[in-house]
Image (cartoon, rainbow, N blue to C red):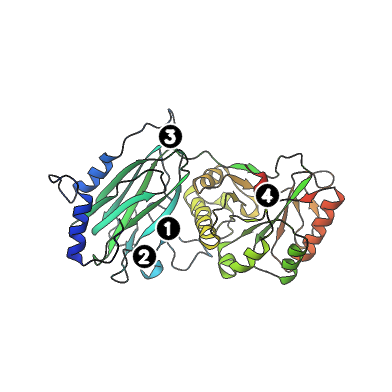
Amino acid sequence: MPMPMRLSASAAAVALLTALVAPATATPAASASTAAAAAAPSVPTAPGAPTVNLATNPGFEVPSPSLADRGSIPGWSCSGGPAEAAVTTTAPHSGTSALTVTPADADSTGECAQTVSVQPATAYTASAWVRGAYVHLSATGTGNDVPPAWTENTGGGWELLTTRFTTGPNAHSIRLYVHGWYQQGPFSVDDVRVDGPAPAPAVASGSVPTSDKVVFFTVDDGWQRTPEAERFIADHRLPITAFPLPMPAGTDPAYFQRVTAVPGSSIQDHSVSHSDLSTLPPDRQQVEICDAHDAITRIFGTPPTVFRPPYFTWNADTLQAAADCGIRTVLTADADFSQGASTIWHPGPLQPGDVVLLHWTDTLAADLQRALAAADSAGLKPAGLVDYLH
């Protein structure tokens, strides 16, 4: 619950109690979370829709993937970064670990947040076990006001915070957050939940159904970024769908912005560590996809809606994890023109709607030229993938 300026500890306590405890007869501490939960209407979900926990890495048990930001908390974005937030193994609420946040200075609340995909016009319950003083839990982007759950002080033990909300008719994702308060010291969080029905699984596809004479060029990874490829894309006005990993994308974001400047181009999700997702359990798949989704959104400002599984390997868990991360399409390809190849995985030449795989390598300019020649000989033109995926 933001305030216009940093307050002293005593002033913060008075302000919080005044702002959050409306009835004079309400008890201010442990009852605050219960009152917040009761304030939101309970709307039944669709009959038969299973209730699941949609939070990513809810118990802070998932190890950080390789190629992740150093010191990152898988599934979570913490405002103070590794200087404030860390996974600790000291007295967790359950399991082997919990999140502990130590605000670095008097101007920090130590907020940690994640994006959670939801269904519109649907009831959800958010909860977390917390330890510390003036710890808050709530969500934004729901389409409705959400009363924050909070506690004045847990007295050294763990306390459950709970709040309920119903998403608006246009809400497809929410921002779940937890934070402490100014000058109130460290706090801990464990066993986070966002309970409700999951989004429908993403759709898997290797091509785009269309009768238009178009083909789609997709370029993966991002480790080798050459000026020759950049010039070829610009000179031929090629719409490119880029699937960079977060690390090279964050290292040289301006390059990816330039090579996707042609209308129809976009930057999409390719996981954090380029692992074979079919070998990972669902919670680790969700971290791989969601963390990359949030990194691409943070770097380039537009949330990806397409996921390219590394090695083209995926399973049913991948489709659900992708949907839980805001992804609508899990996309492979029909042809590979990477590093000198000219492989088409169906009889004959390229066909309308084919997706062509390429990679950001030192051969990309020549690979694009060869792919463009193959498209021309088939009477096809490169088009923007996002314009054809609905």
User: Residue 68: x and y, percent?
Assistant: 51, 64
User: Which residue is at 29% across, 54% downward?
Assistant: 136
For the residues labelled 2 and 4, say whether their Cβ atoms are less than 8 Å apart.
no
Distance between mark 1 and mark 2 Cα atoms: 10 Å
Q: Nearer the viewer, mark 1 or mark 4?
A: 4
- Mark 1 neighbour density, 10 Å: few (under 14) some (14–19) many (20 or more): many
- Horizontally, residue 274 falls left or right of residue 238, namely left
Callout 4 secondary element: helix
Residue 153 makes an appearance in the image: no
Disc 1 is placed on an element classified as: loop
Q: Which residue is mark 2?
A: 85
Three-letter residue code for mark 4: Leu
The residues tagged by marks 2 and 3 sit, at their Cα atoms, a distance apart of: 33 Å
Instruction: Say which residue appears at 61% left-offset and 46% top-offset.
Output: 330
Per the image, the residue denoted by label 1 is 76
Q: Judging from the image, what secondary structure is the residue with disc 3 in?
A: loop
